[in-house]
Amino acid sequence: MKIVLDTNVFVSGVFYTGPPYQVLEAWRDGQIQLVVSPEILLEYAEVGERLAERFEGVDLASFLRMVAANAQIVATSALLEQVCDDPDDDMFLACALAGEATTIVTGDRALLRTSGYRGIQVVTPRAFLRDQLGGGT
């Protein structure tokens, strides 16, 4: 199963336990395939840099290298129309379409409201674990 991780899920999974961490574990264990675009990798890196400025010892670099080496990286095209209330989030939908991912995992309410767009499920980490992986907390 191919999925796209919103930035908030990726960052939360790196630094905290709980459902986002369990989603990253499922990827690490080969249960799911992560799909990213260069734009998403850039956003992951920018958020990591901002966190590093605010919190000493925060470094996403090794995690970003792991994603770049082990995820499917796809080139995307802009959507023909704005789908999400937050136009910046359309890149996750574009990535899912380009990579033929069936699911986007996010905690972002605006992105969650786009679920069903062109057959893409947009779900929370907890719902993903429960409904797609048969577990979770």
Image (cartoon, grey):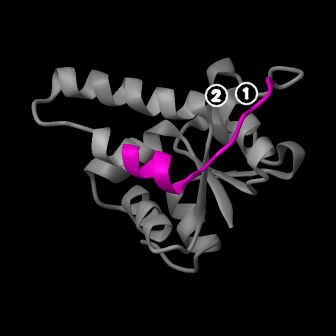
- The structure residue drawn at horizontal position 62% and vertical position 37%, both measured from the top left corner, is 37
Looking at the rendering, which quadrant does residue 44 occupy? top left
CA neighbours of label 1 inside 10 A, class few (<14), some (14 to 19), many (20+): many
The quarter in which the N terminus is drawn is: bottom right
Residue range in magenta is 65-78
Task: Kindly give the residue lying farthest to the left in the view shown.
Answer: 56
Instruction: Write down the residue under mark 2.
Output: 89
Is the residue 17 above or below the residue 55 in the image?
Answer: below
Compared with 9, 45 (above or below) is: above
Q: What residue is drawn where x is 47% and y is 51%? A: 69
Label for residue 84?
1
Q: Residue placed at 32% from the left, 31% from the top?
A: 48
Query: Secondary structure under badge 1?
Result: loop
Q: Amino acid at mark 2?
A: Asp
> Dot 2 surroundings within 10 Å: few (below 14), some, or many (20 or more)?
some
The reply to whether the magenta stretch includes residue 12 is no
Residue sitting at x 54%, y 41%: 6
Instruction: Tell me residue 112's x, y (percent).
Output: 66, 42
